[in-house]
Image (cartoon, rainbow, N blue to C red):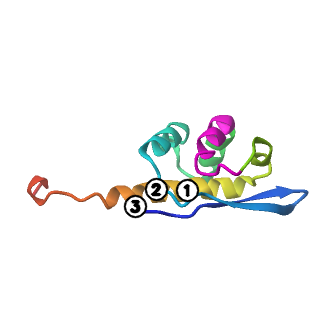
Amino acid sequence: MERDFKLNIYKNGKVIKTVAARKIDLTMGTVRKLSKIVSIDRINNTADISKAVFEAWERLTEILNALFPDITDEEWDGVKINEMITLMIQIGETAVKEALLIPTDEKTKNP
């Protein structure tokens, strides 16, 4: 399942650049690295996601550079936190949807 992800870069309260992730499938490596930063078992609300984003900002932007190669290190500082949280939720939703699309063998299902 491919999905477009977009982020706005702000300066002085104005959008100076909008970047779109390359239309790629999320890799297991990206999802695994992000899940180490934002542990699902610790997330109960957006405040928990915000805390995880702040605590691991450098690692997070390093990982997201794979999705957004056109964002410079300086531009990451111009991303609004609410947009970053929305992006993290979208990535999580996409990963779950992709997992649900994995075909199952009817013979191995529990009754």
**Percent from the top left, x then y, of residue 14?**
86, 63
Q: Which of 101/83 is in front?
A: 101
Q: Which mark is residue 97?
A: 3
The mark lying in front, picked from 1 and 2, is 2
Q: Give the spatial CA distance, label 2 vs label 3.
A: 12 Å
Q: Earlier in the sequence, mark 1 or mark 2?
A: 2
Locate the C terminus and report the quarter of the image it occupies. Answer: bottom left
Q: Quadrant of residue 106?
A: bottom left
Q: Which mark is residue 9?
A: none
- Say whether residue 42 is left or right of residue 15: left
Instruction: State the extent of the magenta-drawn residues as a range.
Output: 55-70
Q: Which residue is mark 2?
A: 25
Element on which disc 3 rests: helix
- Image position of 32 with respect to 26: above or below: above
Q: Earlier in the sequence, mark 2 or mark 3?
A: 2
- Say whether residue 97 is left or right of residue 7: left
Whether residues under marks 2 and 3 lie with C-beta atoms below 8 angstroms apart, the answer is no
Q: Which of 81/17 is in front?
A: 17
Whether residues under marks 1 and 2 lie with C-beta atoms below 8 angstroms apart, the answer is no
Residue 66 colored magenta?
yes
The mark lying in front, picked from 2 and 3, is 2
**Percent from the top left, x then y, of residue 28?**
42, 45
Q: Dot 1: within a 10 Å radius of its alpha carbon, few (fewer than 14), some, or many (20 or more) residues?
A: some
